[in-house]
Each structure stands twice: as structure tokens, then as C-alpha cells.
Image: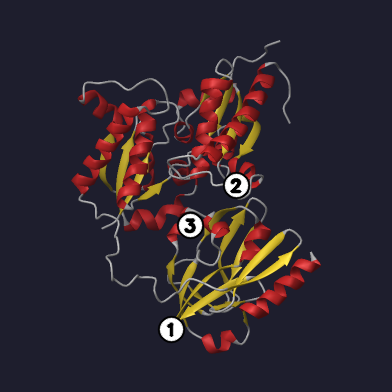
Amino acid sequence: MRTRDMVLVIPCSGVGKVHGLISRESAYLVTDELAPEDTDVVCLALLVREDEETLAKVRACPCITIDGCAKACAQRNVEIAGGQVAKAFQVAKALGSHRGIQPGTGSDLTEEGWAVSREIAEAVAEDAVRLCQGEEVA
Amino acid sequence: MNYAILACTGLDKPEGSVAREVAIRLAETTGAKIICPVALNRTPARYKRALAENRLIVVDGCATKCASKLAAATGTKVAQKVLVSDVVKAAGSALDPGLRLGPGALELARKMADGISENEAFTPKKTRRAGEAPAEMEFEAASDHVVVVHDKYEFRIPATGYYFNANDVWAQVAGTRARVGISDYLQQRLTDITYVDPPEIGATVAQFDELGAIESTKAAFDVISPVSGVVVRVNEAVADAPESINEDPYGSWIAELDLTAWDEDRALLVDGPAYAADVERKAAEE
């Protein structure tokens, strides 16, 4: 049974770095393709600038963050804004389980980079659907 | 004059995607440094030097102007501002609603990047002419390695030219200068390196003082200097792409120092073959 209208997916900014690009593309895969009815993307710059509409959305909906690295800018800024991070993903950790692959650059992903992006997106989408159905995600 | 680019994150509007693409193109074609708006908001000290030493170009996606507001919050003088939505409007066209850029939007980003660089008369990335001596010539890349094999791991150690302390930090010496970085053994133990905090240029350090720090997905590590000296350069490329240490630990130096006590420092360091024996022992004890 659906108990939530929407889960927010928030990737890190990560401009010009491959970890950031994977994070962003994972988010778009979720919101465009895998779970478009259940998810929406939020711009992190708007959140850190304390845009009122963005703050209200983040405080009202469960959030799944996708960070590029251990600095965890997306996760930390959602928490600072008073939002609830239901699940936090990290591209660096995902890449850690695929040691040796060449994911691409800050502007282009290789096939291997796209595969990691999709792997993260599928996990995010699965959690988003479960959250919308009122389930907990670990 | 060098440049820094601050573009909006632009994650939820096509104008933002164009702003981000403009920043990446400018960085690729001119060598300008990209400033991450979110990191700037959270840890402005990280960009203090870049903003002080470079002229700042700000690229906003929409009228919310997050990037401009962040620049204002840091008190940084802006050399040039561009608003993507104004450019689109002036062109009498509209962007496709999707967040992934199509050919038209990519062409717009290319034109905008070219226009900005023409207005600012960027100095293109320096390319070396045939026969011209490379700037890094005095620090030669390691060509011959000792390899320590332990279980499924292989640890590479340059056979010559590098000196190591017990903290797995190396120094490569050329004349009166040394570059400092971490060993292959240490980078494999740390796993994916995600952040490098280089020392301040001008800092004076003694042997075994801290010389910046590194964070990975697994641990944080203080870089313990193998040499005494004054920091004259830090490797911005490594700070921008910390993962390069995982990929090339002996080419990815962190800081360069003017040496002040090399003869004394050398006595407390080991060369490559001796360090290989240390690594073999450390790996066996793990």
C-alpha cells in the first residue's frame, strides 16, 4: 500500500569529477527511468542556499542521497537542512567493489562507468519504491 | 592571469545542466579551476587560495542565481557573470525539458564557453613544443620497481631515487628540493582515497612533522614528512583528483619542499630495496 507520495533523490554536485558524474547520472536514471512516479530530484545548490520551496520539500519527504565521495556533501547538507536521510549511497564505495575498472572522466562515462551508475540507480530505485510503500530501508 | 569557474549545480533544470557543461568545457579548454558550489558553501577555506589567486567566472543556470549568491557570500570579486536562461532567451529558442543535454544544448554550451573565453582572453593550456624541456624534468618518473607479493596483493616500490620513512611516506630528491607522497603499500591499505588536504605553501616543517592529510573511504591519515624544509608547491591536480594517488602513487606527489637538512634527514630514511623488506614484514604481520 502506498503511504508516501514521493521520495527525493539528491546527488552531490561533483562538477567535473567522475564520482560526481556517476552520482548525478544514477539519480537521473532513477527519476527518469526506474522510478519516475515515486521519485523527484532536488538540486543541492538550491538546498544549501536555503531556497524555501526546496527546504520544505526536503523536510516533508524521505530523502535518498547519492554522494560521490566520503565528504558526503549531499547527505550532510540534507541533515543540516533538517531533512531525513532514509538511505545514503556513496559512489566511491560502489567503485571500491569494482577495483581496476575505468569509469571515465568528469564529462563522459565509459561502459564500465555506466554499469556502476545503473547498479547504484537500481538499488536506489528499489529503496525508493519500498519507502513509498511505507517500508523501512536499512 | 588564471581563472576559476563557479557554476550552479543545476541538478533539476536544463539551464543548470547547460551551466555545468559550460564550466566543464572551460576547464578542459583553458585549464581554469572548477569551484564546486556545494563544497564552497560548506568549506570555503578549501577554495580560499584559488579564489584569491584567480579571476572568477560565475555561470548561473536560472534566475535563482545560486552561484552568484555563493560568490557574494565569500566576498569574491567576480570578473564575469553569465546567466544561461538569459542567453537562451536572447537566442529566441528554448531548451528541451530533459536534464540530459541534447545536441542543441551541447552546442549552446560550447558557444557560451567560447564566448566567455574570448571575453576573458584566456591563456590556453600550455603545450610543450618539440624539443622544449619539460618543466618536471628534474624529477624523473620511477622506471624500475621492486615488487613485493603478499597473498593476492602486489606492492610496487621504485628501486632507486625514492627514500621512505617508517610511516610509508616517500621523498624524491632533486638538487635542493624534494617531492613528498605516499607509497603504493599505503594507498592499497587506505583503499579509495577521496580527499587530500595539502599543507600551506610557505609552511616550515621538520622531519616527522605533519605535512597535510589524506582521507579514504576506509581511514584518515596524517602525512608524516620524511624531510625538513619549506613548502614551496602543492600538487593542485592531486587535491582536485585524490584518486590519482591510487592510480599512480609515485607520480602523484602532494607537496614540494626546499630542503633544509637533507644530510641529517637521509640518515633516518631507507631506500627502495630496504623499504621493500619493510613492506614484506608489515604485510606478513597484518
Instruction: Using the image, determine if residue B236 lies above or below residue B131.
Output: above
State left or right for residue B112 relative to residue A70: left
Residue at horizontal 63 percent and vertical 41 percent from the top: A94
As helix, strand or loop, the secondary structure at mark 2 comes to loop
Give the CA distance from mark 1 to mark 2.
38 Å
Chain ID of residue with mark 3: B
Chain ID of residue with mark 1: B
Instruction: Using the image, determine if residue B115 lies above or below residue A126.
Output: below
- To which residue does mark 2 refer? A70
Q: Tell me, yes or no, whether the two marked residues, 3 and 1, touch with CB atoms within 8 Å.
A: no
Taking depth in this image into account, of B254 and A54 the one nearest to the observer is: B254
- To which residue does mark 3 refer? B239
Residue at the right extreme, as displayed: B285
Residue at the top extreme, as displayed: A1
Q: Is any part of residue A132 visible from this angle?
A: yes
Quadrant location of the C terminus of chain A?
top right
As helix, strand or loop, the secondary structure at mark 3 comes to helix
Give the CA distance from mark 3 to mark 1.
25 Å
**Label located before the other in sequence (3 or 1):** 1
- Image coords of residue B239 (percent x, y): 48, 57
Q: Sort mark 1 into few (<14), some (14-19) or many (20+) by Cα contacts within 10 Å.
A: few
- To which residue does mark 1 refer? B175
- Identity, as a three-letter code, of the amino acid under mark 3: Ala
- Image coords of residue B19 (percent x, y): 35, 35
Instruction: Using the image, determine if residue A33 lies above or below residue B200.
Output: above
In this rendering, which labeled residue sits more in front, label 1 or label 2?
1
Quadrant location of the N terminus of chain A?
top right
